[in-house]
Image: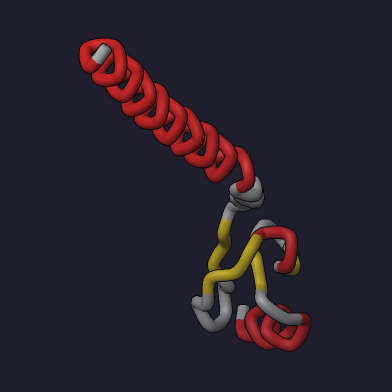
Amino acid sequence: MIYLIKLLLLAAVVWLIYSILKNYARSVDRDETDVPATPEQEDMVRCAQCGVHLPKSESILSRGEFYCSEEHRRQHQGNS
């Protein structure tokens, strides 16, 4: 009878460890899928007037050169 109780206790401990590990694995998988996707990277360009770097979509392209503002475009083209 004592052998049967020990066997049942061992089975309960093994089941408990298995359940804990299974729940932990689920939470790790859930955490990885909850991470938001990173935004796509964009090319950076350098202002021909002041040298500041900015995203290409925010720059002003004129005569093959990029500028951070309309004022810098005018200043640089006035110097050329």
Residue lying at 74% horizontally and 84% vertically, measured from the top left: 74
Residue 72: x and y in percent read: 67, 84
Report whether 46 appears left or right of 58. left
Report whether 38 appears left or right of 6. right
Residue lying at 58% horizontally and 39% vertically, measured from the top left: 30
Say above or below: 59 vs 1: below
Residue 49: x and y in percent read: 57, 80
**Quarter the N terminus occupies:** top left
Residue lying at 65% horizontally and 49% vertically, measured from the top left: 36
Report whether 47 appears left or right of 18. right
- Is residue 16 or residue 48 the one in the foreground? 16
Report whether 18 appears left or right of 35. left
Residue lying at 57% horizontally and 62% vertically, measured from the top left: 45
Residue 64: x and y in percent read: 67, 57
Quarter of the image holding residue 21? top left
**Quarter the C terminus occupies:** bottom right
Instruction: Specify the color scheme.
Output: secondary structure
Quarter of the image holding residue 60? bottom right
How many marks on residues? 0
- Is residue 38 or residue 16 the one in the foreground? 16
Say above or below: 36 vs 73: above
Residue at the farthest front position: 1
